[in-house]
Image (spheres, grey):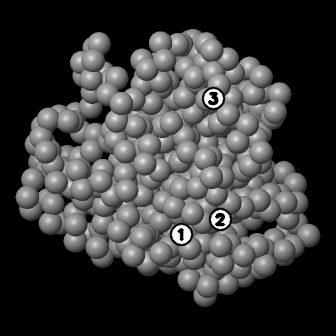
C-alpha cells in the first residue's frame, strides 16, 4: 500500500491523468495547470496562457477573484455541508437567492439551487410538466443544455444524441429563430426551453421579433417559456441577463457556470407560486444532497457582488468592439458576437484547428464550439484588459498569417 502511494507521488501527473482520469476526448489539452489569476493561467513548466475562454463562460470576474477566495475561506471556517437541500437556513444560500431575485424581473423571485447547469435543466423540465400537467417539451436544433439523460434529450444535434437512445419521449426540436416553428407550440406544450443566444452552434442570437412572438405564443397556449442563461448570464452578452436586451422575461430562468464564481452551482428560478408546485403531490418534488452548497453559494455571491460593483456588464460592449476591430483577416469567413461571446468562423474545421493549435502553442488559450468545429471560441473573463485583447488578437493574426 505504502509502496504504491510513494510510487504515485514520484510518478508523472501527466501519466496519471491518462492512466486514471476517465478520458472522453481523443485530444485533451492536458495542460498541467499550476495557477490562474485574472485572465492568465500558468502551467507547471511556467508557461503563461492568456485565457480567451474563461473555463467556458465561468470565470466572468477573472480567475482568483480575491473576494471570492476570501468568501470561500470564511465559509469553510463556519460549516461545509450541513444537511440536504432545503432543510437548514444557510446564510450564503439565502443571501445569494435574495441578490438574484433583486437582480431579476420581479416574477422570478424564487431560487432552487442545484449542483450544475444540466441539473437546473432537469429541475425546470420537471417543474413545467408538474405545473402544466402536459408532457410535450420543445427545444431547438443546435441547442445545448447539458449531458444528463433529460438535458441530452433536448440537445439539438443527432450525432451527439443518437448513441444514448432511448431518450425522453415527448420532445420536439424546432428551428431556432424560425417563425414557422412557432406554429408547432400548442396546448399540449408544457414548455419551450431555449438558449437566449445559441452558444455551441457558434453564437447565434435570435431576432427580437421572433422572441417576442415566441413569448406571445407561450402566453396564448399556456406553455412555460424557459430561458437557458447558463452561458449568457452574468454579463456575458453585455447586460446582466441576455434576455434583458429583448425586453421580455421568461417564466423560468436557468443559471449555471458563472453563477458559482468558479465553484459548481446551478439554479432554476421561477415565481413563488409556480415553484410551490414542487412542494405538493409529491412533496420533495426535486431533491438534491449538495445543491446550493454553502461554500459554492458564498463564492457565487462574492463573484456576483464583484460583477455588480465593477459594473462589468457595462464594459463588455467596448471590449467586444475592440475584438471585432482587431479580428479582420481574409481567412475569417464570418464573425458573430453577443458581447464577449464570440465565434470566429473559418472555411472548415481543419483551418480552425490549425489556428487554435497555433494560438495555444503561442500562449493564447482558445477553443472550438460543440456544433461548430469550424469556429474559434472567444469568451474571455469580462475583466480582460484592452492590452490583453490586443496581445491575444496579435497572436490570432499571426496564426492566420501562418497558414
Ligand atoms: N446550458 C448551456 C447553454 C450550456 O452551455 C451548458 C454547459 O456548457 C449547460 C446548459 C450544462 O451545464 P453543466 O455543464 O454545468 O451541466
Farthest right residue in view:
330
Would residue 347 be found to the left or right of residue 23 on screen? Answer: right
Displayed quadrant of residue 84? top left
Q: Residues within 10 Å of mark 1 (few under 14, many from 20)?
A: many
Give the mark toward the camera: 3 or 2. 3
- Name the residue beneath numbered marker 3: 218
Q: Is mark 1 within 8 Å of ligand 1?
A: no
Q: Residues within 10 Å of mark 3 (few under 14, many from 20)?
A: many
Label pair 2/1, CB-CB below 8 angstroms = yes
Q: Which residue, given by chain and number where applicable, does mark 1 sit on?
A: 313
What secondary structure is found at the residue carrying circle 1?
helix
Say which mark, if any, is on residue 279: none
Q: Is residue 122 visible?
A: no
Along the viewing direction, whichever of 358 and 179 lies nearer the viewer: 179
In percent of width and height, residue 198 lies at 67, 45
Q: Give the alpha-carbon distance from disc 3 to disc 2, as whole Å.
A: 27 Å
Location of mark 2 (residue) = 339
Question: SS class of the residue under badge 2?
Answer: loop
Residue 45's place in the image compared with 224, above or below, is below
Task: Residue at 39% x, 76% y: name it.
Answer: 309
Which of labels 3 and 1 is toward the front?
Answer: 3
Residue 197 appearing in the image: yes
Left or right: 218 in relation to 119 = right
Under tag 3, what secondary structure? helix
Q: Residue at x 54, y 35 (%)?
A: 226
Left or right, 98 with respect to 333, comes to left
Label whose residue precedes the other's in the sequence (2 or 1): 1
Amino acid at each position: 500500500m505504502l509502496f504504491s502511494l510513494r510510487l504515485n507521488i514520484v510518478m508523472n501527473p501527466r501519466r496519471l491523468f491518462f492512466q486514471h482520469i476517465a478520458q472522453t476526448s481523443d485530444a485533451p489539452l492536458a495542460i498541467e495547470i499550476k495557477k490562474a489569476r485574472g485572465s492568465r493561467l500558468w502551467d507547471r513548466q511556467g508557461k503563461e496562457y492568456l485565457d480567451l475562454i474563461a473555463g467556458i463562460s465561468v470565470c466572468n470576474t477573472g480567475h482568483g477573484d480575491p473576494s471570492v477566495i476570501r468568501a470561500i475561506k470564511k465559509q469553510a471556517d463556519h460549516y461545509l455541508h450541513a444537511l440536504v437541500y432545503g432543510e437548514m437556513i444557510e446564510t450564503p444560500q439565502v443571501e445569494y437567492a435574495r441578490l438574484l431575485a433583486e437582480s431579476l424581473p420581479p416574477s422570478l423571485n424564487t431560487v432552487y439551487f442545484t449542483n450544475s447547469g444540466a441539473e437546473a435543466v432537469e429541475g425546470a423540465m420537471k417543474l413545467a410538466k408538474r405545473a402544466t400537467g402536459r408532457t410535450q417539451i420543445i427545444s431547438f436544433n443546435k441547442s445545448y443544455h447539458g449531458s444528463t439523460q433529460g438535458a441530452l434529450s433536448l440537445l439539438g444535434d443527432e450525432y451527439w444524441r443518437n448513441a444514448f437512445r432511448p431518450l425522453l419521449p415527448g420532445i420536439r426540436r424546432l428551428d431556432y429563430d424560425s417563425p414557422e416553428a412557432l406554429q408547432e407550440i400548442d396546448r399540449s406544450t408544457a414548455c419551450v426551453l431555449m438558449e437566449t443566444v445559441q452558444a455551441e452552434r457558434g453564437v447565434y442570437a435570435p431576432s427580437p421579433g421572433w422572441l417576442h412572438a415566441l413569448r406571445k405564443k407561450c402566453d396564448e397556449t399556456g406553455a412555460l417559456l424557459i430561458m437557458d442563461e447558463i452561458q449568457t448570464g452574468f454579463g456575458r452578452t453585455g447586460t446582466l441577463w441576455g434576455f434583458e436586451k429583448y425586453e421580455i422575461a421568461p417564466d423560468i430562468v436557468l443559471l449555471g457556470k458563472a453563477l458559482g464564481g468558479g465553484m459548481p452551482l446551478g439554479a432554476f428560478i421561477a415565481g413563488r407560486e409556480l415553484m410551490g408546485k414542487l412542494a405538493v403531490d409529491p412533496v420533495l418534488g426535486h431533491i438534491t444532497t449538495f445543491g446550493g452548497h454553502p461554500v459554492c453559494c458564498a463564492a457565487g455571491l462574492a463573484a456576483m457582488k464583484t460583477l455588480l460593483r465593477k459594473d462589468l456588464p457595462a464594459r463588455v460592449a467596448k471590449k467586444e468592439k475592440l475584438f471585432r476591430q482587431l479580428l479582420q483577416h481574409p481567412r475569417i469567413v464570418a464573425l458573430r458576437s453577443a458581447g464577449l461571446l464570440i465565434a470566429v468562423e473559418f472555411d472548415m474545421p481543419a483551418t480552425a484547428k490549425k489556428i487554435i493549435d497555433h494560438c495555444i502553442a503561442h500562449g493564447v488559450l482558445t477553443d472550438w464550439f460543440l456544433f461548430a468545429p469550424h469556429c474559434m471560441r472567444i469568451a474571455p473573463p469580462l475583466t480582460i484588459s484592452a492590452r490583453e485583447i490586443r496581445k491575444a488578437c496579435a497572436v490570432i493574426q499571426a496564426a492566420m498569417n501562418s497558414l
